[in-house]
Amino acid sequence: MKRVITYGTFDLLHYGHINLLKRAKEYGDYLIVALSTDEFNWEEKQKKCYFSYEKRKQLLEAIRYVDLVIPEKSWDQKAKDIKEFQADYFVMGDDWAGHFDELEQLTDAEVIYLPRTPEISTTQIKKDLNSKEK
Ligand code: C2G
């Protein structure tokens, strides 16, 4: 059983996120998503989520590629999570390329950065919605 772990806010959930989760799952049989809590998002990423952690968790749990959702409460829980959940792969979009390479020294997991889906982002969605309202 190969296990994969990934991290993110996933708000507003869109097909770029789904593309990432789909490709991450292809590395194994079990995909764990560490979902940023509302507090972590605000304190560490200055992101005010549209959907609460519980709602974002509910959405992720409905995705066929996702097997388990756990909370992401701090930047430095990744090595512990990888060990606790025996993850073989740590997968992120390549906007994070290079940021988590040390996990290959700290754990047995392979770090993989996958190309982002370029044309979609929550910021873009909000911009488009605002411009349509005018
Ligand atoms: N993503 C993607 N394509 C997009 C948008 C996002 O592939 N068009 C990927 C990101 O690269 C990331 C995942 O989807 O791997 C989740 O994206 P976000 O919710 O924006 O996550 P982020 O805020 O970058 O949080 O500790 C790591 C952080 O929690 C990552």
Image (cartoon, grey):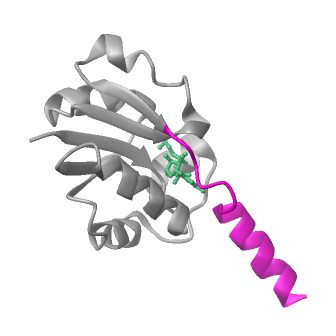
Q: Is residue 71 magenta?
A: no
Q: Quadrant of residue 101?
A: top left
Q: Is residue 33 left or right of residue 17?
A: left
Residue 30's spot in the image, x, y percent?
18, 50
Q: Quadrant of residue 50?
A: bottom right
Q: Is residue 82 left or right of residue 45?
A: left
Residue stretch in magenta = 114-134
Residue under the point 39% across and 27% down:
76
In the rendered image, the residue lying farthest to the right is 134
- 63 or 45: nearer the eye? 63
Residue under the point 66% across and 54% down:
118
Q: Quadrant of the N terminus?
A: top left
Residue under the point 48% across and 35% down:
113
Residue 45's spot in the image, x, y percent?
59, 44
Q: Quadrant of the C terminus?
A: bottom right
- 39 or 83: nearer the eye? 83
In the rendered image, the residue lying farthest to the left is 1
Is residue 23 positioned above or below 126 on the image? above
- 120 or 77: nearer the eye? 120
